[in-house]
Amino acid sequence: MTWPFKRLGTILEESSKRKKARALLLKKMLETGLRVDKNGRFYFDDIEVSDTAIAKSLGIDRRVVRQTADYILLDPNLEYIFTRLKPVAFFKDVAHYLGFTVIVITSYPEKPGIISEVTSIIAKHKLVIREVFAEDPELFEEPKLTLIIEGEVPGEVISELQAIKVVKSLTIIK
């Protein structure tokens, strides 16, 4: 097994050459935490999901879903990754209902330090971070850093965040 020495994007690219439906399913599995077990069954945590339901959701043939499960189990890199995924709650779309503020930042993914700089500013202002989600630059063309902050975010904090050199854009969702 070459993992973790190969980059995730390389593993996915090699696994889905000329196989668009397979690539779509593998990416969706990574985005949602959908995993395959040692018997080739798909699960969200411990909830089994049928091949048909996955195929219908993605608009692909059910046989591609089955073939992808088999393929994953035959490849040690894929098996290592796709049998260990976990779904994670993401509060972005319900944050306003819970009294939270959402900060979405687009930056230059090749430049290090964005999470450190952002969380330092937020901590300096004694704001509570309830959730942080960073999209993987190998999976997303324009990866975003999303923070769920307890309560309101003062304008001063927003100005400081916008001043970070690697920030391309910043969106506040209340």
Image (spheres, rainbow, N blue to C red):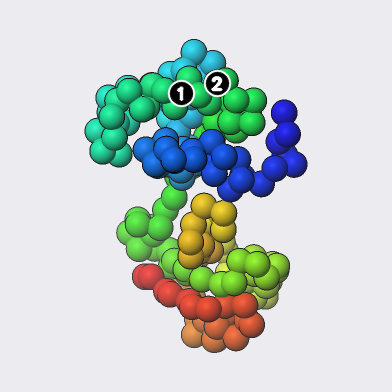
Q: Where is residue 157 in the image (x, y as percent from the top left)?
A: 56, 81
Going 32% across and 23% down the picture, which residue do you hit? Answer: 63
Evaluate whether residue 132 shows in this view. no
Examine the rendered structure and indicate whether residue 16 appears above or below residue 114: above
Q: Which amino acid does label 1 sit on?
A: Ala
Q: Residue at x 49, y 57 (%)?
A: 140
Amino acid at pointer 2: Leu
Residue 172 is marked as: none
The residue lying furthest to the top in this view is 39
Residue 54 at x, y = what percent? 32, 31
Q: Which residue is drawn at 49% across and 38% down?
A: 16
Quarter the N terminus occupies: top right
Looking at the rendered image, the quarter that the C terminus falls into is: bottom left
Q: Which residue is drawn at 44% across and 40% down?
A: 18
Q: Nearer the viewer, residue 65 or 49?
A: 65
Give the class, few, some or many, for how many residues have Cα within 10 Å of label 2's Cα (few <14, many ≥20). some
Image vertical order of residue 48 relative to residue 13, above or below = above
Between 95 and 112, the one lying in front of the other is: 112
Q: How many marks?
A: 2
Residue 41 position in % (x across, y down): 43, 18
Q: 69 or 168, which is in the foreground?
A: 69
- Say which element carries label 1: helix
The residue at which mark 1 appears reads as 69
Residue that badge 2 annotates: 73
> Which x, y percent locates residue 2?
73, 34
The residues bearing labels 2 and 1 have C-alpha atoms spaced at a distance of: 6 Å
Q: Are marks 2 and 1 in contact (CB under 8 Å)?
A: yes
Label 2: which secondary element? helix
